[in-house]
Image: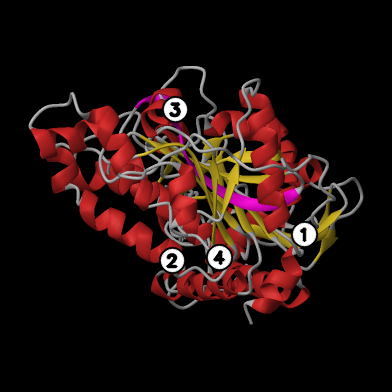
């Protein structure tokens, strides 16, 4: 798609307003100092005839129908005011020179001043080689403007089109709160043609593709351009729209005393509620982000109408948490802080990974970093003890300002079998350890670790419990996002 075609797909019809001021381009008939020609058609004498940079720009404008390699402005996305920055690949391969960089930076600064989210769509070979180093360093200027925009708590969403390489990918193409790419897009730092020219061999196939980068957690997903409005609508529904009135009912009554071993067995049952049930039955407008380790799920969502970032341990994977999962969780924490959104963590894990790879990957340090990050966030935080809460993997998501627990959830330094092995040399004393170690939700509430316990009646289902948990979370997530940002100063 051209820049204009993409704008027509994403924005409400007729809502786009250009912010682009006319650019004074070099005289097509005059050679520019330091500018290098790309095209060298043969003259009548058979010798290459240099084409000035000005002539290249004039020809590019004629082909692309734009005066530069980027189009900026504002418009409406499903009725919401947004700023857009869109590459035009038809203009010298979308390369970014000084004029294009200035246009991008000015648009971001204006968006920040007007309090608008920025939607960026890239399609570029990177820095404009005709301008060299002066254009190259302009990526710093763009990055500074974007970091100021994000520091203001405003969303920055990125869509990578085919191709996106070089300095563009290494700056404003990689700074999004959410980043997706179109299917099959070439996305990478070093262009494959440059690699082959420098090293005399082809770049490994399949590496610089949108799908591969999504699988490795570099980007958040692969989305057809035609489906982009759906994703943006969901994301902006969480990031921009005010909270709606809760519709779910909070569960009343007191949870009775639970037997520790009975709770452990209940939380290990295949039909036990998991984080996916919570999102399915208690949330709307969910946008799942990248999951290079499936044991952790990160999402933008609304729990009973209240926008938040959710970081949840997925019991359906039956997998302990390794360093990658913990880094993934910390990304969700930072995202909540950046956007001024409340954070909800969901604890349901058999524990941290015990392996050589985990130790060499710094699993202990990652647990420590998660604890420190969560404990010092300025946004409202809620931890939901949903099921199993084993070891450092559980502790990494625990230290929120409010801790909610399902009646049969539990928290322990080791699974009861592990505690039994340490104390007695075997696992047969696990039921007794589950009792003596005071691991139940009721025990945890008594010592002040848990603030609210949600009862689980005998006829409870994953759906009904999910709705009760979402309602309880929503009750603690009061105030709209603008008030939260004001509180953050």
- Residue annotated with mark 4: 338
Q: Which mark is residue 375?
A: 2
Q: Nearer the viewer, mark 3 or mark 1?
A: 3
Residue 48 seen by the camera: no
- Residue annotated with mark 1: 82
Disc 4 from disc 2: Cα separation: 16 Å
Residue 282 lies left or right of residue 47; in this view the side is right
Q: How is the image coloured?
A: secondary structure
* Secondary structure type for disc 2: helix
Badge 2 crowding class, 10 Å Cα cut-off, few under 14, some 14 to 19, many 20 or more, is some
Residue 313: give x, y in percent of width and height: 44, 38
Residue 449: say if magenta: no
Disc 3 from disc 4: Cα separation: 34 Å
The majority secondary structure of the magenta stretch comes to strand
- Residue annotated with mark 3: 267
Disc nearer the start of the sequence (3/2): 3
Residue 218 lies left or right of residue 237; in this view the side is left
Residue 290: give x, y in percent of width and height: 48, 40
Disc nearer the start of the sequence (2/1): 1
Residue 222 seen by the camera: yes
* Secondary structure type for disc 1: strand
Residue 142: give x, y in percent of width and height: 54, 71
Badge 4 crowding class, 10 Å Cα cut-off, few under 14, some 14 to 19, many 20 or more, is some
Disc nearer the start of the sequence (4/1): 1
Disc 3 from disc 1: Cα separation: 44 Å
Q: Are discs 3 and 2 less than 8 Å apart at CB?
A: no
Disc 3 from disc 2: Cα separation: 26 Å
Name the residue rendered at 76%, 65% in the picture.
Answer: 479
Badge 3 crowding class, 10 Å Cα cut-off, few under 14, some 14 to 19, many 20 or more, is many
Residue 480: give x, y in percent of width and height: 76, 63
* Secondary structure type for disc 4: helix
């Amino acid at each position: 798609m051209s820049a204009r075609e993409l704008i027509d797909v994403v924005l409400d019809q007729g809502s786009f307003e250009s912010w682009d001021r006319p650019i004074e381009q070099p005289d097509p008939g005059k050679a520019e100092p330091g500018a290098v020609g790309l095209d060298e058609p043969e003259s009548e004498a058979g010798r290459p005839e240099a084409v000035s940079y000005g002539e290249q720009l004039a020809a590019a404008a004629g082909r692309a129908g734009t005066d530069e390699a980027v189009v900026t402005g504002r418009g409406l996305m499903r009725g919401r005011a947004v700023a857009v920055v869109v590459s035009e690949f038809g203009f010298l391969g979308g390369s970014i020179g000084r004029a294009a960089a200035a246009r991008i930076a000015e648009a971001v600064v204006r968006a920040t001043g007007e309090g608008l989210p920025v939607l960026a769509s890239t399609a570029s070979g990177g820095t404009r080689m005709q301008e060299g180093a002066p254009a190259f360093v302009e990526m710093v200027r763009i990055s500074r403007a974007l970091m100021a925009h994000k520091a203001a708590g405003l969303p920055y969403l990125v869509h990578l089109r085919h191709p996106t390489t070089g300095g563009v990918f290494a700056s404003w193409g990689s700074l999004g709160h959410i980043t997706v790419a179109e299917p099959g897009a070439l996305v990478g730092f070093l262009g494959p043609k440059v690699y082959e020219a420098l090293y005399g061999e082809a770049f490994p196939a399949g590496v610089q593709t949108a799908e591969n980068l999504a699988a490795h957690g570099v980007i958040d997903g692969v989305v057809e351009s035609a489906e982009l409005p759906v994703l943006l609508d969901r994301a902006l529904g969480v990031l921009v729209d005010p909270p709606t009135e809760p519709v779910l009912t909070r569960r009343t009554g007191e949870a009775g005393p639970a037997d520790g071993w009975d709770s452990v067995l209940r939380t290990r049952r295949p039909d036990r509620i998991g984080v996916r049930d919570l999102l399915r039955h208690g949330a709307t407008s969910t946008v799942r982000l990248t999951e290079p380790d499936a044991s952790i799920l990160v999402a933008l969502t609304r729990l009973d109408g209240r926008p938040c970032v959710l970081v949840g341990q997925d019991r359906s994977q039956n997998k302990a948490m390794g360093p990658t999962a913990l880094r993934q969780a910390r990304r969700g924490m930072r995202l909540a802080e950046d956007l001024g959104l409340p954070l909800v963590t969901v604890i349901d894990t058999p524990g941290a990974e015990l392996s050589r790879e985990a130790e060499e990957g710094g699993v202990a340090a990652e647990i420590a970093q998660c604890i420190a990050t969560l404990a010092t966030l300025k946004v409202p935080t809620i931890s939901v003890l949903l099921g199993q809460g084993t070891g450092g993997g559980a502790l990494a998501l625990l230290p929120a300002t409010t801790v909610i627990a399902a009646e049969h959830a539990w928290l322990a330094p080791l699974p009861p079998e592990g505690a039994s092995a340490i104390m007695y040399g075997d696992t047969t004393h696990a039921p007794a350890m589950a009792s003596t170690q005071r691991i139940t939700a009721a025990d945890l509430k008594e010592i002040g670790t848990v603030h609210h316990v949600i009862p689980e009646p005998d006829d409870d289902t994953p759906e009904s419990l999910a709705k009760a948990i979402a309602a309880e979370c929503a009750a603690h997530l009061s105030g709209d996002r603008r008030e939260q940002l004001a509180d953050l100063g």
